[in-house]
Amino acid sequence: MTVPVIVDCDPGHDDVFALWFAAGHPSLELLAVTTVGGNVPLEHTSRNARVALSVAGVVDVPVAAGARGPLARELSTAEWIHGENGLGGPELPDPDAGPTPVPLDPRSATELIADTLAEASEPVAIIATGPITNVAVLLRDRPDLAPRIREVVWMGGSTERGNATPYAEFNAWVDPEALDLVLQSGIRFTMVGLNVTHRALVTSRVRERLAAIGTRTAGFGDELLEFFCRTNDEVFGMPDGPLHDPVAVAVLADPDAVEIVRTRLDVELIGSETVGATSVDLDGMLAREPNAFVAVGLDVERFWADVEAAVARLA
Ligand code: RIB
Ligand code: CA
């Protein structure tokens, strides 16, 4: 039984592996891809999503561009990790040319998601791996579609410290208002935060395993990982770069690989030092109604085996 999914992303090195995981894993059916301004501006994230699918030979999945920036703030980007074009490292092929072109769909992200939900025979899961602006816009503008959304699984936030500020993870920090709107919507929501994604470390052994797949996709991916590990070492002192976004995909592809708990999740919108911080009340201190699932554990070996199996099924 495959799970139908839409991936909303801001490629970004780890977003590319999330796309490949969603496209290649036999437990999932990737129906559509939407992009958002995040790691780099929307023009780059949209082109990069198309490059990722083109390299992997995934030519039957539409890609549409969404929000340029957050609901209520200026866009903050992360070139210091991902490079100026968002996919530092390899030479990027032209996604409009070559044997496996992936054009940009003329629809907006909301239009593509709405059409995809309407055409699907069952509710579709949305996996968001960037600032969650597009999902917030969809739920704000088309609340009628909520019953067609199985759930939202989002890479972002943290039960511990941040990576954009001491208290805020990047995706939450870029657009905290969008996260708040999604949480208020009541949609089934799972947060996959830094507390588990920091266990998805690209060790030299992981790089060897993925490179040994020996395909065009694996070779391109290894060049991405070379750059990603270098910048994570330079910025965070983490030479085994944490590959955040594919962990959100694992929640749906292989639920036993990621431990999640039902808890209370809120996001800080006004703190001068803490805006974007995700407040995860794991001990029930606030006596508020639980409103989300939060990832608290990762079977690391199982996770990498899933990623490897998915990438190996691509071009
Ligand atoms: O904090 C990590 C998240 O921010 C990942 O989604 C990465 O791609 C960046 O978007
Ligand atoms: Ca991302």
Image: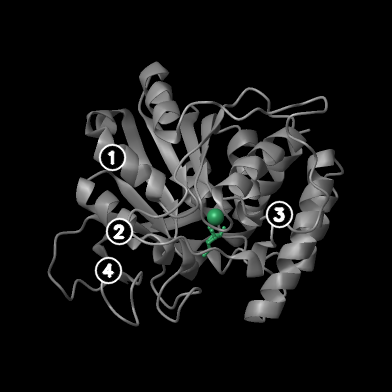
Does label 3 or label 2 sit earlier along the sequence? Answer: 3
Dot 1 falls on a residue whose secondary structure is helix
In this rendering, the answer to whether 7 lies above or below 29 is: below
Badge 4, how many Cα within 10 Å: few under 14, some, many 20+?
Answer: some
Instruction: Give the quadrant of ligand 1.
Output: bottom right
Question: Amino acid type of disc 3?
Answer: Leu
Task: Identify the mark at residue 94; answer none if there is no mark.
Answer: none
Task: Read off the residue under disc 4.
Answer: 269
**Residue at image coords 65%, 48%:** 17
Task: Read off the residue under disc 1.
Answer: 139
Toward the front, the furthest residue is: 74
Residue 177 placed where, x, y %?
Answer: 30, 58
In this rendering, the answer to whether 264 lies above or below 143 is: below
Q: Which of the pair 165/77 is nearer the observer?
A: 77
Per the model, the C-alpha gap separating discs 3 and 1 is 30 Å
Task: Identify the mark at residue 177; answer none if there is no mark.
Answer: 2
Dot 2 falls on a residue whose secondary structure is helix
Per the model, the C-alpha gap separating discs 3 and 2 is 27 Å
Does label 1 or label 2 sit earlier along the sequence? Answer: 1
Badge 1, how many Cα within 10 Å: few under 14, some, many 20+?
Answer: some
Residue 173 placed where, x, y %?
Answer: 41, 67
Question: Amino acid type of disc 4?
Answer: Leu
Does label 3 or label 4 sit earlier along the sequence? Answer: 3
Does label 4 or label 1 sit earlier along the sequence? Answer: 1
Task: Read off the residue under disc 3.
Answer: 87
Q: Are marks 4 and 2 in contact (CB under 8 Å)?
A: yes
Per the model, the C-alpha gap separating discs 4 and 2 is 7 Å
Q: Is mark 2 within 8 Å of ligand 1?
A: no
Badge 3, how many Cα within 10 Å: few under 14, some, many 20+?
Answer: many
